[in-house]
Amino acid sequence: MIRLTDVIQGRNNNFHLLRMVAASAVLFSHAFPLSTGARQDEPLRAALGCTFGSIAVDLFFLISGMLVTLSLVRRGSAVEFAKARFFRIWPGLIAAILFVMLLIGPAVTTLSPSDYFTSRHTMKYLLFNMFLLRGASDLPGVFSTNPWPDAMNGSLWTLPAEVRCYLALLAVWFAVRQLNWTSARLRQVATAVWVVLFAWFAWTLRSSTVEESPLHLWLMFSSGTLLYLYREHIVMSPLHLAGALALLVLSAGHAMAFGLVYALALPYVMLCAAYLPRGAILQYNRLGDYSYGVYIYAYPVQQTLMHLQPGLGPIGLFAASMAVTLALAVLSWHLIEKPAMRLARPRRERAPVVAATTTPA
């Protein structure tokens, strides 16, 4: 058994690998509707009310909630925290936006270059995504004949949601400092907030699926924060993990029951996957954190491949897009993301970095 408080500060974990698996799951999940044009073709949607992609996004928010809370507490500075979050998200994001807008868009649009670059939709794509205002997925004249038409990057909608979670966390942190709450008091309030979110989430499951619930990302982020706050009381063991997985399997036949078990079990499954496997698997950390690059480049790569090869099926699209996207992600990490993360560190700490990132964002 491993107690969370004994390992949460260290780097001997599988978060890089978990995020990479999750980013790949998003790519796999999108391969079905992007190649067939039908959302219901995703393998898990009909059976569980969620998809490989939505589970992956929930996993991102869980990891983020825990590790970003740790980062804020450890830094003890809102400015340093905001600086770290900025340099983790925006340099890679801006590069991906410009890559899509300046290279892919002009190459495939049905408009003339002048009409394309002067269109308000082009400017909207740039500004809305760069400032994370809300989702802006389309570029003018781009992918209008694809099976899933007029969508350039449908994955970016989660980034504004994550930034809102960061802002909420900062607001709570300021309140805690002003009110001089003890750790016990903070846990009580955080638990109360989580209970309200969980109850509200449970209520939404009466008429929606896990994926469609408007609260599942907030719930997952707050669950990650709660894991950090209760780190001294959380023990991870293969036996407990087997129990959590068994409950997920047993509840899979009933949509609402599965949704409730899923929300309760996924945080524990995530912890066990991150900290229990040891040995050679930890060597993956030497490769770098390519998950963010996979996440932000996969969708436009898949849409481009469908434009060039309209007959690609889901598995063919997954395989081809994974190869191209991974190459872009590796370049993004080594040329943009990793150097940017060094800038976020205090000057005295700017040694070579093994990334302590949180989510794909």
Image (spheres, grey):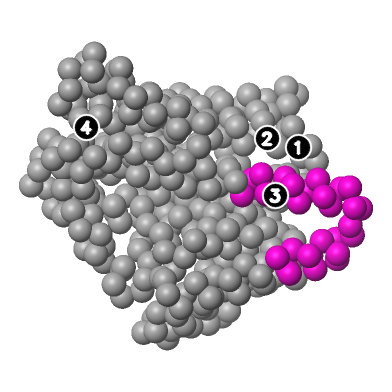
Give whichever of discs 3 and 2 has the lower sequence position: 2
Q: Position of residue 93 (x, y in %)?
A: 46, 32
Q: Residue at x 47, y 29 (%)?
A: 130
> Which secondary structure, mark 2?
helix
Q: CA distance from mark 4 to mark 3?
A: 38 Å
Q: Residue at x 82, y 61 (%)?
A: 186
Give whichever of discs 1 and 3 has the lower sequence position: 1
Q: Nearer the viewer, mark 4 or mark 3?
A: 4
Residue that label 2 marks: 82
The reply to whether the C-beta atoms of the residues labelled 2 and 4 are less than 8 Å apart is no
> Which secondary structure, mark 3?
helix
Residue type indicated by callout 2? Ala
Classify residue 308 as left or right of residue 51.
left
Q: Residue at x 21, y 47 (%)?
A: 148
Residue type indicated by callout 3? Leu
Residue 174 part of the magenta segment = yes
Residue that label 4 marks: 142
Asked if one can make out residue 337 in the rendered structure from this viewpoint, the answer is no
Residue type indicated by callout 4? Val
Q: CA distance from mark 1 to mark 3?
A: 10 Å
Q: CA distance from mark 2 to mark 4?
A: 35 Å
Residue type indicated by callout 1? Ala
Q: Nearer the viewer, residue 349 or 80?
A: 80
Q: Position of residue 153 (x, y in %)?
A: 33, 40
> Which secondary structure, mark 1?
helix
Q: Position of residue 262 (x, y in %)?
A: 49, 73
Residue that label 1 marks: 78
Q: Which residues are magenta?
A: 165-193
Assign the N terminus to one quadrant of the image. Answer: bottom right
Asked if one can make out residue 8 in the rendered structure from this viewpoint, the answer is yes
Classify residue 130 as left or right of residue 348.
left
Q: CA distance from mark 2 to mark 1?
A: 6 Å
